[in-house]
Amino acid sequence: MKAVMCLMGKEPTWQSAKKEMGFANFVDRLKKYDKNNIKPAILKKIKAYRKDPNFVPEFVWKISVAAGAMCDWVCAMDLYADVYKKVKPLQDKLEGAQKELAYKQRGLRQKQEELKNVEAHIASLQADFRAAENHKNLLQERKHALELKKERALKLIDGLSGEKKRWEVSIEQYMKSKLHLPGDCALAAAFITYAGPFDAGYRENLYRSWRVALKEMPSDRFSEHSDNFICDFLSEPTRVRDWNIWGLPVESFSTENGVIVTRTCRWPLMIDPQEQAKKWIRNMHKESKLVEVKASDEDFMTIIENAIGGGRPVLLKDVTEQLPSPLDPLLSRTVFDKSNSISMNDKDLAYNPNFMLYITTKISNPHYLPETLIKTTLVNFMVKTEGLEEQLLGIVVNREKPELEQKNTQLVVSMAKNKKTLKDLEDKILILLKEADASTILDDENLINTLGTSKGTSEHVKNQIKETEETSKKINESRNQYRLAAVRASVLFFVLNDLAKIDPMYEFSLQWYNDLFKASIDDSKLAKKRSKGRQKQMTTSKRIRELNNWHTESVYKTICHSLFERHKLLFSFLICAAILKQDVKIIPEEFTFFLRGGVVLDRKKRGPNPCVDWLSEEAWDNISELDKLGSAFAGFSSSFEQQSSEWQEWYQS
């Protein structure tokens, strides 16, 4: 108990112990003893007490339970004090560390809060950055898109800048033609309907009379027509050039014929003694598998019926002045709309709209009944001077300079192809622009590239056309050196053509004449080769003179074998007169006088006949009119008064 009292800071006596144990809270005080603050002096005393051999808890428990418990408490306090002595510095360190930890944790929490705020700020900045980055990317995309649009716009402007002027002119022409369309259509319809049978001169007179009549109408309904109005209004240059390649002569009369044949609503009936229309039709429908048939063929109607169903073009050749009656339904175009069929020979045939019918006759001056003419369009394809000259020029150049004519043919085909390509490209550009959405046209890269390609090709084709035209001009200059030979050959052909007026048997085909012309050229070459040294020395002009003489002689000798004797002198005269007229060595008025004589309308105004005793009044009429022609015959009538006896002697000799 002394040790207990010592720990409790009391007198280590039994009385003190009894007193303390007498308190009710003695046990609680032991339990709540401040074991962490035991003074070293007290611990020293406790250790001294514990050195007593009897101060062992096991021993004391045997003596007294209460004393044993007190002994355990004292030992525990001593042991605790020893341990606490070692632990206390550690606890102090722990407490310092905990305080430091708490301080650090407070700082950490503050920093974490600051970090959280910074992270939130960073997140906000990152969000702003991402938004700015997205906006930047959007702007870059828009910039790129705008740059592309700018590039495409420049391409479009550059590509179409050359087209603007042409379009403006085209629009102006279109607006004018739209305003004048009723009158122009009336004139074109009249020409197609009525002008076909006539020659170039009569067509021109018709056309001019119609124009005069049109001038009496309101001026804003009719355009000022050019001489080539019909060809310009109803055809295109590229199409006409194709016709020329296919064999249609290169002159306005033949072009008008082509327009009439392709534009008429009735089947064309072509006057074709020289078979030029046949050649043109054959070449034009070469890829359409043209069916050729004659009315004299036994199965010609079966052939035509098959062509009607198959939609193939038919060329009915060499008809007479009476067309086959089975053709009437076809000529009348009595096609049933609902069934799209036609009734022929008591049977209905399926009518293919691609079917076409061309009719030709070799009769140069046919007389068709009105019933035939109202069902067909009669077209005069008789050869004309200009067209024949071009054909013959091609023959002579091909014989004399084959490489030149071959190149010319290639250039004609190339030019036609290039002009057609150019027209197609110009139309393609317009179609692309028409179908494009104006609001998104710059977004359509394919459209811009296509336009650029088309424009580039168009410019290339234009340059090719320009080069071709320049080359063609040079070639034509070289070809024209031989034109006099073609002119002479043309003159001779028309002399032969006029022989049919003397006798219907005197008919010569153009193909036969072309072969004769080729033979003349070849024969003259052989003759030239036989003349030593002449071939190298002969100029083109000399060669043409030689060729003209050779061909003229060849025509004369060949034709004379086919003529009656009584017609040979007339034939010689016609050849000489035609050549002299072509060379402008005959005055037209004098030649007309020679053929027809003088016509006196009023003999009172004529001078009196000074030689009435031997000179008839009719002869004096001719002498008086001849004097009026002037030139070489000036004073001719007065010479009869002055030299009457000399003239009488000559007249009666």
Image: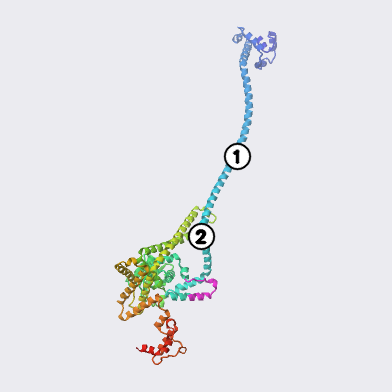
359 over 145 or under it: above or below: below
Residue behind mark 2: 163
Q: Residues within 10 Å of mark 2 (few under 14, many from 20)?
A: some
Tell whether 12 sits left or right of 160.
right
Q: Is residue 221 magenta?
A: yes
Question: Callout 2: helix, strand or loop?
Answer: helix
In the figure, 123 relative to 539: above or below? Answer: above
Q: Which residues are magenta?
A: 208-227
Q: Is residue 211 magenta?
A: yes
Residue at 45% across, 89% down = 607
Q: Nearer the viewer, mark 2 or mark 1?
A: 2
Residue closest to the eye, 597 or 507: 597
> Which residue is the extreme one toward the top?
53
Q: How many marks?
A: 2
Say which quadrant the N terminus sits in: top right
Identify the image quadrant of the C terminus: bottom left
Q: In the image, residue 592 lies at what x, y percent? A: 41, 81
Q: Is residue 108 visible?
A: yes
Pointer 1 residue? 125
* Image position, residue 45 (x, y; %): 65, 9
Q: CA distance from mark 2 to mark 1?
A: 55 Å
Relative vertical location of residue 33 with respect to residue 271 in this rendering, above or below: above
Callout 1 secondary element: helix
Tell me whether circle 2 and circle 1 mark residues in contact (CB < 8 Å). no
Note whether residue 355 is visible.
Answer: no
Asked which quadrant contains residue 352, the reply is bottom left
Find residue 369 and report its horizontal and vertical position in percent.
40, 78
Dividing the picture into quarters, in which one does residue 81 lie? top right
Query: Where does the image place residue 361, in percent across and percent down from the top left?
Result: 37, 73
In the rendered structure, which disc, 2 or 1, sits on the residue that comes first in sequence?
Answer: 1
Callout 2 amino acid: Glu
Residue under the image location 37 percent in, 78 percent down: 577
